[in-house]
Amino acid sequence: MAWIFAGGVVGTAVRYYIEKLLPHDGASWPWGTFLINLAGAFVLGGLLEGLSRLGDDSGWRLRARLCAGTGFCGAFTTYSTFALEIVLLGRHGYFGTAISYGLLSVVGGVVTAWLGIDIMDRVHRRRTPA
Amino acid sequence: MIAILTFLAGASGAVTRFLLDAWTKQRWRSPFPLATVVINVTGSLLLGVLAGLVLFHDQSSMWQTVIGTGFCGGYTTFSTASFETVRLIQQGRRTLALSNAVVSLVLSVGACALGVALARAL
């Protein structure tokens, strides 16, 4: 549990500062959350695939998954801010932006998570020739 | 000070997610990742209420930052939702994968809008 907490502090802190650099005004494309969520999905995909290729989910691999995965990636990415941004864009009448932001984020998250998994898969295969 | 409180709240959100996820997975034995959907929908509802209180009742935005950006942000997760959709696709469960993505998006946005409306009606 302490591993998750530690990863969660760092993940929230990094997201907090990125959102400060790229704040959302309720009218334009929410770049901060968009980039955070796609990057976090990519890292989580690569991390979980990489760890599962290295061995079973115990010992340091379990701690790494809880700290970097459940803690960091989980707290770094956010579904609630993402949903609120869509609601605020809709409230201000920017329906096109709201819908494309929602769909592109969901599709983009799946694509980047897949990419992370795929890259780790290739790295692993290169290291362990058949 | 607000920043530190926000980071700690975010970490508490992550631990809450872990506990709720484990609790739900013990009771829900189906390939559909219900735990993450419940977490994201309830977190979005709470953030909607907080944002509504700031928008319509002139509440200090400090609470939206600490509990909203911190707790709700750390509690809900976009990366796990995306990852679980990919795993479902890889297992050949395409319908479940698509419903997971659509249900998460529609219910979370709906819950957040409901939260904002609830706060406005207060």
Image: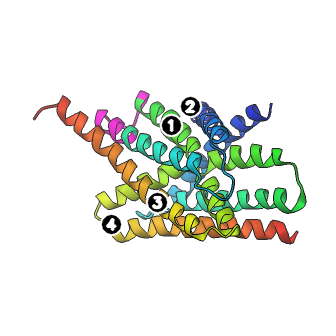
Sequence-first tag of 3 and 1: 1
> Could you tell me the amino acid type at mark 1?
Leu
Q: Position of residue B34 (x, y in %)?
A: 51, 63
> Could you tell me the amino acid type at mark 3?
Leu
Query: Which quadrant of the rendered structure holds the C terminus of chain A?
Result: top left
Q: Secondary structure at mark 1?
A: helix
Q: Secondary structure at mark 2?
A: helix
Disc 3 and disc 2 on one polypeptide chain: yes
Disc 4 and disc 2 on one polypeptide chain: no
Q: Is residue A84 above or below residue A69?
A: below
> Could you tell me the amino acid type at mark 4?
Arg
Q: Residue at x 70, y 67 (%)?
A: A92
Q: In screen coordinates, is A55 left or right of A97?
A: left
Q: Residue at x 39, y 48 (%)?
A: A113
Q: Who is closer to the viewer here, A3 or A40? A: A40
For residue A104, which numbered disc appears in the image? 3
Label 3 with label 2: CB-CB less than 8 Å: no
Mark 4 or 3: in front is 3
Q: Is residue A56 magenta?
A: yes
Say which residue label 2 marks.
A3
For residue B93, which numbered disc appears in the image? 4
Q: Secondary structure at mark 4?
A: loop
Sequence-first tag of 2 and 1: 2
Disc 4 and disc 1 on one polypeptide chain: no
Q: Is residue A129 above or below residue B77?
A: above
Q: Main secondary structure of the magenta part?
A: helix
Sequence-first tag of 3 and 2: 2
Disc 2 and disc 1 on one polypeptide chain: yes
